[in-house]
Image (cartoon, coloured by chain):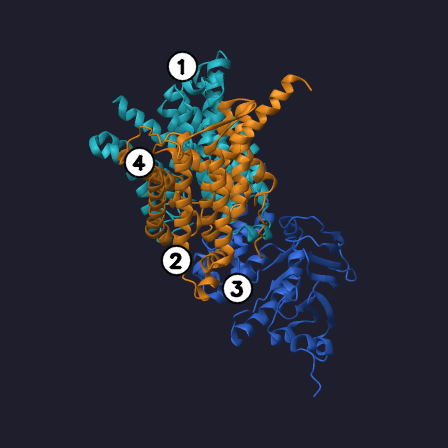
Amino acid sequence: MSQNFIYFLWDCLQYFINGIAQGSLYAMVALGYTMVYGIIRLVNFAHGEFLMIGAMCGFYALRANLPMPAAILVAMLSSGLIAIIVERVVYRPIRKSGRIPALITAIGTSLFFQYFGQLVFGADPKTIPPFIEEKIFNLGEINVSNVQIAIFCITLFVLLFLFWLTHYTKVGKAMRAVSYNLPAAELMGINTNKIISFTFFLGAALAGLGGMLMGYTMSVEPMMGMNLGTKAFVAAVVGGIGIIPGAALGGFIIGIAENLVAGLYKSSLRDAVSFFILILILLVKPSGILGKNMKEKV
Amino acid sequence: MTNAHSPLLALENVTMKFGGLTAVNDVCLKVFPHDLVAVIGPNGAGKTTLFNTITGIYNPTTGCVKFSDHDLKNTKSSDITALGIARTFQNIRLFKNLTVLDNIKLAKHTRIRYGFWSGIFRSKKFKEEEKKIEVECIELLKLFGLESKKDFYAKNLAYGQQRKLEMARALATEPKLLLLDEPAAGMNPTETKELTELIHLIRDKFNIAIILIEHDMKLVMEIAEKIFVLDYGNLIAEGSAKEIQSNKRVIEAYLGAEVNL
Amino acid sequence: MGYYHGILLLVGIFITLTLSLNLINGFCGQFSLGHAGFWGAGAYASAVYSVFYAFPLPAPINMLIAIAVGFIAAAICGLIIGVPCLRLRGDYLAIATLGFGEIVRISIMNTEMVGGPRGFINIPHWANIWWVYGVAFVIALFMFNLKRSAFGRAIISIREDEIAAENMGVNLFNSKLFSFTIGAGIAGMAGALFAHTQQFLHPSNFNFMWSVIILVMVILGGQGSVTGSIIGAVILTIVPEALRYAGGTVAEWRMTIFPVLLIILMMAKPEGLFGAHEISFRKRSEG
């Protein structure tokens, strides 16, 4: 084996590791998309903006000299709160009008927050420091940062938490019931509105968490939700929208693919990667890798 | 061309499986031109699934559906309609935001004799053909008593009228075989009687064969010249109304097996 | 005077653009979210012709050719995207078209020949207000006549109930692909007109936001209504401009007012101003 080839393999491993970390972020954000879609069949275009608002609040919390854990909490709560408000005020009344009006409303909400954010927060990018003191471990040819390891572990923990939540708690089972059949769940005495609000809150809070953890790798500005949100959404679709493990799977796939393409080929094509994977999945298996094919009954 | 002795529609060992579920199991049946037959059976027996395999919504897992000796395997629903099979749907599928007249006119799609550009440039041929279609469609509406409602939006019709429109629309495709899926659902006895007469009328006037799925036994026994009984996807009996009424298996299927005390 | 002239040109171009999306979304009911991609593909393709390959012919003939180039390029994109995507259900189709729209834009951004992120300059000024409104008029007439012919009815029935339409003899795939391809092509024509009036193109003009703007024009007017699309395009080109002209806080906040109006529209009248109908002087409106 030539020297070059070995270096190439090491490079791949590096990109792979970076991809896992990046993918963790996408996974966290994707969870929100997938949970909301799972429960009310709505693609929440504004999810990225919930993240943005959380990250902004977290930034201001840090500026107010709050310690990092508190700032993260602030971010999560603000994201979650905004999500609940939007669901209650905007999405709930539209739900009865059909899916296209709901989708358009979500698009409108997303655009509103982007431009509103520019006016309120200013369009200038803000920076968030890494949530723990960054230490880089040198393992031969590759570098791994403790932040990367931490975010991966946190993501795994979140996934385990969600699994426990949806399978072993009353709330979680109610969530699953609503996602299978909303009218029936209502008839079973489940307060579907509360469950839906809770789902929105949880999804957005996780996105806010992701934003704070990985905020140091990107600029925090009002348009950040657009780019990040779109990729996380693609991740959710790739893994199987509506399916929680799917969001994680999709997130990692997108993260790794992006880093491999950017590193081995051209970094300017980074943003196109997620779209290519999206198209591929939609052509081959539109319901996503872990998704089930649901046909309409005639 | 089919002669009086060759079937218009022949199902040969048709089986329809969805994963592990067998909805239709090895069904053989024949329908001849001008026949008026019914398919009955308890809910979930596979009747609508059977219709769906005939009209191309599903491809039979095994076996084949032949129309005028033409194997319908892998044929699109739209092509099957062009060949001459039309159907109504159990849960009405009208074009809600189109007018009654437009609903019917649409059904003439496969019989239109002008091209795309004739339509855009509104050529003489287009105008003539459109006029002819309009006249035919209004005649059809008259038959169903819907002429006065021709400019109403389909969604604004009463339920019974919507059912009639479903039938009229299917007829507008100029079929040789008409499949009616529970045409009497939700109708009161007067409407059902009207329907019985209507079905006889269209069978004779348009010289078509009709297959009926129905739960209303009075209607079935009165109208059907031959009855096929499905249970759990299997064809358990076929025969005249009298024969079916005294068939033990049929009685069991509907009422459950007799309990010996 | 030049300022108002510019607005008028944009209105005309957006009328054509809105009509083209209406064919796909409104008539056929296929929810496409990447329409600006077709607009851009047509604009850039026609500009490439004009700037690099133009024949030595008088301007009007060259403009005609440029429009044809725009149409064909965009229609080919429509075909390529439509064939795989049109078998997808509602939400998925929307996502796929969104993705494709972005891919078109990113591809343009990465193409040196057309200036990439610096933009494409020096496109000849071959189009004028007559061209813009001439095309708009022709397309409006085309759509109006289509609606009243058998093919239009077939396309619209797909929107209403696909399965019923297929069982009444409508070939779903062909009709959907037709709407998609022609809709894309017409957007390409609008692109050619845009390129040859603005004389400058930039990929940011064909991003997702613009796809949304065109979509709002269709929705506002009413999906399936030709009159509606015209009115929708007029209102949504003029009003934001008027707000910007007003200056001050109104101008700053206009980009937030826009989505809010959209949301209110969805809450109050999701079927738009005209629904699926045309403006009618008869008592009973014909669909």
- Tell me the shade of chain C: cyan
Amino acid type assigned to the residue bearing label 3 in the image: Arg
Q: Residues within 10 Å of mark 2 (few under 14, many from 20)?
A: some
In the rendered image, residue C89, in percent from the top left (x then y), is placed at 53, 46
Chain painted in blue in the figure: B
Q: Is residue B230 above or below residue A13?
A: below
Q: Quickly name the residue at label 3.
A: B163
Q: Residue furthest top?
A: C56
Residue A78 seen from this side: yes
- Tell me the shade of chain A: orange
Task: Report the chain holding disc 3.
Answer: B
Nearest to the observer: residue B225 or residue C158 = C158
Q: Secondary structure at mark 1?
A: loop
Q: Where, by quadrant of the figure, is residue A124 drawn?
A: top left
Q: Quickly name the residue at label 4.
A: A62
Q: On the same chain: label 4 and label 1?
A: no
Amino acid type assigned to the residue bearing label 2 in the image: Asn
In the rendered image, residue B123, in percent from the top left (x then y), is placed at 52, 39
Q: Where, by quadrant of the figure, is residue A126 drawn?
A: top left
**Mark-to-mark CA distance, 2 and 4:** 34 Å
Task: Report the chain holding disc 1.
Answer: C
Q: Quickly name the residue at label 1.
A: C122
Q: Quickly name the residue at label 2.
A: A193
